[in-house]
Image (cartoon, grey):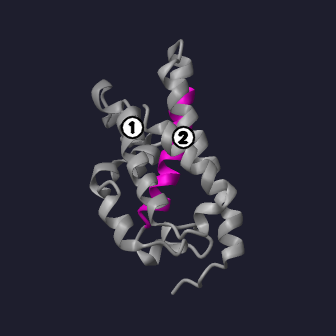
Amino acid sequence: MRKQISQYSLKKSTEHLLYEVSTFYQTIIFLKNAKNQIEVNILLDDFAIHARNLFDFFYPKKPNLIKDDDMLVTDFLINQKIFNRNKTNKNKLSFITEKANKQVAHLTYKRNRYSKKTKSWPYIIIGREINKTLQAFYDSLSINQKKWKNIIDLKNHIEELSKI
């Protein structure tokens, strides 16, 4: 069983959550404006890592695979009902982890199985679906947590992402 994380640690950790969301968002913007395939490739690597990190945060693995220092959505004393009701269904995004692992984070033979059609990342669609989950996360936070500076900044990114 995981130990409960102090409010101090949660508040401090929002800096890292904000970094993931901010970089995820900015990468989508840069991808939309990429000038050549080299830029696209570099940006897709960055996008894949941050998409995977956000997926792993919002959709935790089985308890036996979770490390004690993994930051999880469940650490933030949220209204679980609101979050579960409003987040994107995990099945819509579950491909992110394996795709990031096989195409970016590890040199694997499975890369040979990707075709031009399946190799691409639907980054706009992923962005919209993760944004839906970000909004559900924000909506399920306590009133006190919504006052934290990084959560206020996170809310601004949620609003920016909704325009994509």
Q: Which amino acid does the dot numbered 2 rest on? A: Phe
Residue at 48%, 50% (x, y): give it: 52
Q: Which amino acid does the dot numbered 1 rest on? A: Arg
The image quadrant of residue 85 is bottom left
Question: Where the C terminus falls, by quadrant?
Answer: top left
Report the label total.
2
Q: Is residue 88 above or below residue 75?
A: above
How far across and how far down the image is residue 135, in percent?
Answer: 44, 53
Q: Which residue is mark 2?
A: 24
Can residue 119 be seen here? The reply is yes
Residue at 55%, 68% (x, y): give it: 143
Q: Is residue 43 above or below residue 35?
A: below
The image quadrant of residue 46 is top right
Residue at 62%, 71% (x, y): give it: 69
Which residue ends up furthest to the top in the rendered image?
35
**Horizontal relation, residue 24 to residue 140: left or right:** right
Residue at 64%, 48% (x, y): give it: 19
Q: CA distance from mark 1 to mark 2?
A: 23 Å
Q: Secondary structure at mark 1?
A: helix
**Horizontal relation, residue 92 to residue 161: left or right:** left
Q: Is residue 55 magenta?
A: yes
Range drawn in magenta:
42-60
Q: Secondary structure at mark 2?
A: helix
- Density class for disc 1 (Cα within 10 Å; few <14, some 14-19, many ≥20) is some
Can residue 121 be seen here? The reply is no
How far across and how far down the image is residue 97, in percent?
Answer: 42, 51
Residue 39 vs residue 125, the one in the foreground: 125
Q: Main SS of the magenta segment?
A: helix
How far across and how far down the image is residue 47, in percent?
Answer: 52, 38
Q: Which residue is mark 1?
A: 111
Q: Is residue 152 above or below residue 41?
A: below
How far across and how far down the image is residue 109, in percent?
Answer: 40, 41
